[in-house]
Amino acid sequence: MIKKLFIFILLFIAANSNAQLILGANPSYHIPFGKEAGMGFGAQILIEKPSNERNSYFGKISYFFPRKSVTKDAFVADAIDPNTQPSSLNLSMFTNYSTFSVEFGRRTYWINPIDYGFSIYGGTTMMISFSNVKNRLDSYNKNLYQLFGQDGTSSDNNINGKGNIFSLGISLSGGMKYDINHFGTVFLDLNFGYNFLQLATNSIASQGYQNLGSSLNFYFGLGYRKILFFNNAGRRNGNQPQQRGY
């Protein structure tokens, strides 16, 4: 579904453009502040549309692979029969936390234009994120042991399972890029974001966000991008500033 949406957006922009369109991709690293699980790894796809030689609008699609945490001895299962040994089991909790996000904003380039030489850039963005949380409890013999939930019933349904989190945030983005003739552009992208809204579907998602998610996040990635043309002049040869087609 996401791939089809991305292709549709690309074709729509191409059909309604008579200028440059920039496509790029990069691995991305995510550092949630204040979380022991540490850095996450993911991938990003970039679409950028210059409005003039110094400014552009852009969008990014990101996926961050699951980060994992283990909470040892998180729960205790008691023996149903008093004669069962051991009388109780310490159970660990395993949590996976992955995130898909869509980001859009505006950039300004300094030193050199968008399509020539070395430049630094910066801007602001809006980000919509969807995080998936999956919990798995240590396996145990339910014929011999029982685990009581918060409501006093013998159940682990509110422990094993999954949930989702919707987040809305803003960020400051920046970086640097260098154009190489007949090759494309290499870039270093930086992003510092703040999620001001989080909505969880259940208690599993809420707990997962407390353990692995964060309102303050830092992202960085090193990648490659290419300028494409959709005008009658066709694609240019090289990255010469006099051949821009905004």
Image (cartoon, helix red, strand yellow):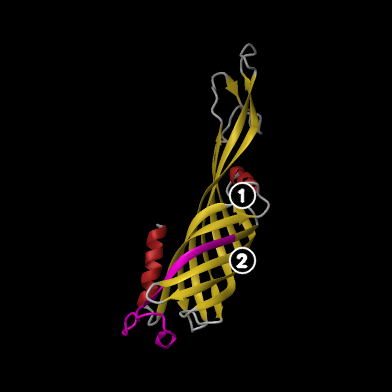
Residue 71 placement, left or right of 14: right
Q: Residues within 10 Å of mark 1 (few under 14, many from 20)?
A: some
Residue 107 seen anywhere in this rendered image of the structure: no
Q: Nearer the viewer, mark 2 or mark 1?
A: 1
- Residue 226 x, y percent position in the rendering: 41, 72
Q: Is residue 84 magenta?
A: no
Residue in the picture at 49% in, 72% down: 58
On screen, residue 155 above or below 82: below
- Residue 74 x, y percent position in the rendering: 65, 33
Residue 202 badge: none
* 187, 164: nearer the viewer: 187
Residue at the far top in the pictured view: 83
Q: Quadrant of the C terminus?
A: bottom left
On screen, residue 95 above or below 44: above
* 196, 227: nearer the viewer: 227
**Residue type of the residue flagged with mark 1:** Gly
- Residue 71 x, y percent position in the rendering: 63, 37
Secondary element under disc 1, as helix, strand or loop, is loop
* Marks 2/1: CA–CA distance: 22 Å
**Which residue is denoted by mark 2 in the rendering?**
170
Dot 2 or dot 1, earlier in sequence: 1
On screen, residue 104 above or below 160: below
* 10, 26: nearer the viewer: 26
Residue 83 seen anywhere in this rendered image of the structure: yes
On screen, residue 229 above or below 186: below
Q: Quadrant of the N terminus?
A: bottom left
**Which residue is denoted by mark 1 in the rendering?**
38
Instruction: Report the span colored magenta.
Output: 219-246
Q: Quadrant of residue 10?
A: bottom left
